[in-house]
């Protein structure tokens, strides 16, 4: 098949899990013999056109149209304030990508248009006006899930895309249930879990001296416990609740330190909360993008990974930790795909489910694992086995292609 893949973020420009997904899944499509063209936004000094690993990447530069948008957009968008520039960039990228895609259909046969979240929905909806090519809407998260309510414009785009696309693919059964609850057509929705590259995320490939250097960076001794959080620093990830759990953890395990890697709107809150609770010697944070090779070493250096999300349609970070043989504590209440990844009891247990809204429950989960080092090692081993059985990118790609092919029939 020739696949038009419309996605807002693509390496080297990464914001979150969507970019990681796009990077790996497109490469797997190529391995399966398909032809993939990525339509994405241009950032920084990257090339506008290039082929990487067999994937053709087309990047579209944007211009600042926020002054033009401001007086003509809805009141809903006006409330975005300075973020109207972000919407302007998204809109322009989508229009340029759609124009290019439609022009491409006049000279080349495209079999599937695959577009991801509302961020590429505008381009897909425009394309539908000019072509009957089957469209698949990949839903990695929703506006109501991210914000509690959010922008009416974004929710309209999500719903319009859901009605227009021939098929919807989402990342977990928890997410499918939530979409159906909000009135989306159940018969259109398929579930395909995300994956991880277990060859890249492999603890056996980490040099002990490099792992030790990570622990030294945060002044964590060999006899101390290193907790690791990686993710966007936003309320749905539960990181503030994790910090509030630290005093309860330290009462029983005083030799414990927490390392936080990520960026987001809660950076100032994290600093203030850490200071207020007197945790400056036990909580370390780095507000920067950590390259993958360094991120892998952080997983290797950690004793336990904690992802207490309140809303998490899937969550690739947990798979990365599992592949690195780390026991994990994950949010599992509400719309959380973590509970489909993490077995919380029995002989195949690889982690603990908690309520990410409750610091006491987070502390309980962490203490449960820290209190039994031998069992923690077994959980880590179980986690990697589970990744190899269910969460590799080749399996994700094969399942996705099967859905695409069903539309061609």
Image (cartoon, rainbow, N blue to C red):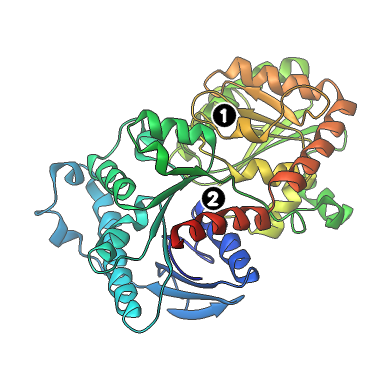
Residue 220: quarter of image: top right
What is the spatial separation of the Cα atoms under label 1 and label 2, in whole angstroms? Answer: 26 Å
Residue 274, labelled with which disc?
1
Crowding around mark 2 (Cα neighbors within 10 Å: few <14, some 14 to 19, many 20+) is some
Q: Can you give x and y, in whole percent of width and height, for residue 205 in the image?
A: 84, 57
Q: Can you give x and y, in whole percent of width and height, for residue 329 in the image?
A: 68, 29
Q: Furthest-front residue in view?
A: 409
Q: Residue at x 90, y 27 (%)?
A: 374
Asked if residue 364 is positioned above or below residue 132 in the image, the reply reads above
Asked if residue 360 is positioned above or below residue 315 in the image, the reply reads above
User: 50 left or right of 54?
Assistant: left
Q: Residue at x 74, y 58 (%)?
A: 200
Q: Can you give x and y, in whole percent of width and height, for residue 70 in the image?
A: 14, 54
Q: Can you give x and y, in whole percent of width and height, for residue 305 in the image?
A: 70, 36
Question: 173 or 233, which is in the foreground?
Answer: 173
Residue 139 in view, yes or no: no
- The local secondary structure at tag 2 comes to helix
Q: Residue at x 46, y 30 (%)?
A: 177
Residue 355 in view, yes or no: yes
Which residue is disc 2 drawn over? 17
Question: 393 or 250, which is in the foreground?
Answer: 393
Question: 276 or 388, which is in the foreground?
Answer: 388
Question: 109 or 253, which is in the foreground?
Answer: 109
User: 346 left or right of 180?
Assistant: right
Q: How many marks?
A: 2
Crowding around mark 1 (Cα neighbors within 10 Å: few <14, some 14 to 19, many 20+) is many
Depth check, mark 1 against mark 2: the one in front is 2
- The local secondary structure at tag 1 comes to helix
Q: Residue at x 70, y 45 (%)?
A: 390
């Amino acid at each position: 098949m020739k696949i038009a893949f419309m996605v807002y973020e693509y390496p080297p420009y990464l914001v979150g899990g969507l970019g990681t997904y796009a990077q790996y899944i497109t490469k797997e499509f190529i391995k399966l013999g398909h032809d993939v063209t990525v339509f994405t936004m241009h950032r920084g000094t990257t090339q506008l056109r290039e082929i990487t690993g067999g994937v053709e990447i087309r990047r579209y530069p944007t211009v600042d149209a926020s002054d033009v948008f401001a007086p003509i957009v809805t009141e809903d968008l006006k409330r975005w304030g300075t973020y109207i520039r972000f919407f302007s960039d998204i809109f322009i990228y989508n229009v340029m990508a759609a124009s290019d895609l439609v022009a491409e259909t006049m000279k080349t046969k495209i079999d599937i248009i695959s577009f991801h979240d509302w961020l590429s929905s505008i381009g897909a909806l425009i394309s539908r006006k000019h072509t009957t090519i089957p469209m698949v809407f990949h839903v990695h998260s929703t506006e109501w899930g991210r914000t509690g309510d959010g922008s009416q414009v974004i929710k309209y785009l999500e719903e319009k895309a859901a009605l227009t696309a021939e098929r919807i693919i989402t990342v977990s059964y928890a997410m499918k249930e939530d979409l159906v609850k909000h009135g989306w057509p159940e018969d259109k929705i398929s579930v395909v879990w995300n994956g991880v590259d277990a060859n890249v995320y492999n603890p056996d490939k980490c040099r002990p001296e490099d792992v030790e250097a990570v622990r030294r960076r945060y002044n964590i001794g060999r006899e101390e416990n290193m907790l690791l959080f990686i993710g966007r620093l936003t309320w749905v990830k539960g990181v503030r609740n994790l910090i509030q759990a630290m005093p309860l953890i330290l009462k029983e395990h005083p030799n414990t330190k927490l390392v936080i890697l990520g960026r987001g709107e809660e950076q100032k809150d994290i600093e203030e909360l850490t200071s207020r609770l007197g945790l400056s010697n036990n909580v370390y944070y780095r507000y920067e993008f950590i390259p993958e090779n360094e991120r892998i070493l952080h997983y290797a250096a950690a004793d336990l990974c904690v992802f207490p999300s309140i809303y998490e349609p899937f969550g690739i970070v947990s798979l990365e930790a599992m592949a690195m043989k780390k026991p994990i504590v994950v949010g599992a209440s509400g719309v959380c795909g973590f509970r489909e990844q993490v077995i919380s009891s029995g002989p195949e247990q690889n982690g603990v489910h908690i309520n990410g809204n409750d610091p006491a429950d987070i502390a309980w989960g962490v203490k449960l694992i820290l209190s039994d080092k031998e069992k923690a090692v077994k959980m880590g081993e179980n986690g990697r086995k589970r990744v190899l059985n269910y969460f590799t990118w080749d399996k994700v790609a094969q399942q996705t292609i099967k859905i695409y092919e069903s539309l061609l029939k």
